[in-house]
């Protein structure tokens, strides 16, 4: 019984380049995750608690600061009281997008970040869904 060799006898395997290269998609950055959560949560916004539960990150503050200062996104914030398991009260901060224009700006930024890392951009339908949940102009958040 004759066996055929899988590789050429020259000692090297032939590298066949395909038409489409497969480039691994990098994972989303913390900044992108915070931006997505701000879009997803609308006026409910995000806090350290929601970031911990969803993204295993206790501090969205730095990403919010970068979005505000480097990218010019208007993000509102307010303190709220949280009663922890020990019975004490901790002051936490909640962040949300100021208005629909800011949400649109943030969606464009997310798509730029996604394109840069080789991921699919947010669809027009998805962006429209996010924008619909946010008022067209800045309005004060009702007291909880």
Image: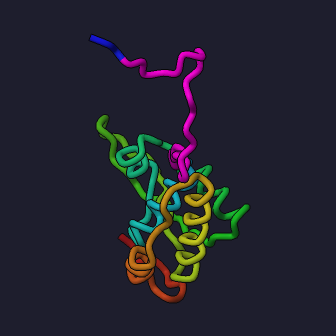
Q: Residue at x 50, y 84 (%)?
A: 139
Residue at far front of view: 1
Q: Is residue 85 left or right of residue 67?
A: left
Count of number-bearing discs: 0
Please say if 6 is above or below 45: above
Q: Residue at x 43, y 49 (%)?
A: 51
Please say if 27 is above or below 142: above
Q: Residue at x 57, y 42 (%)?
A: 17
By secondary structure, the bulk of the magenta-drawn segment is best described as: loop
Q: Residue 115 placed where, x, y %?
A: 58, 60
Q: Residue 87 placed where, x, y %?
A: 30, 39
- Coloring scheme of the render? rainbow
Magenta stretch: includes residue 7? yes
Q: Quadrant of the C terminus?
A: bottom left
Decide which of 111, 69 is in the foreground and name it: 111
Highlighted magenta segment, given as a residue range: 4-28
Residue at far left of view: 1
Q: Residue 23 placed where, x, y %?
A: 55, 45
Residue 33 in view here: yes
Residue at far bottom of view: 136
Q: Residue at x 62, y 56 (%)?
A: 116
Q: Is residue 101 left or right of residue 87?
A: right
Magenta stretch: includes residue 21? yes
């Amino acid at each position: 019984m004759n066996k055929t060799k899988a590789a050429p006898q020259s000692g090297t395997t032939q590298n066949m380049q395909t038409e489409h290269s497969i480039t691994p998609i990098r994972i989303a950055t913390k900044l992108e995750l915070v931006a997505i959560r701000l879009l997803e949560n609308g006026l409910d916004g995000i806090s350290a608690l929601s970031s911990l539960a969803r993204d295993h990150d206790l501090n969205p503050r730095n990403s919010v600061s970068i979005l505000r200062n480097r990218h010019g996104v208007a993000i509102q914030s307010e303190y709220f009281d949280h009663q922890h398991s020990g019975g004490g009260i901790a002051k936490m901060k909640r962040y949300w997008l100021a208005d629909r224009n800011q949400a649109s700006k943030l969606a464009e930024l997310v798509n730029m970040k996604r394109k840069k890392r080789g991921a699919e951009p947010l669809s027009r339908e998805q962006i429209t869904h996010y924008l619909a949940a946010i008022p067209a102009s800045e309005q004060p958040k009702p007291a909880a």
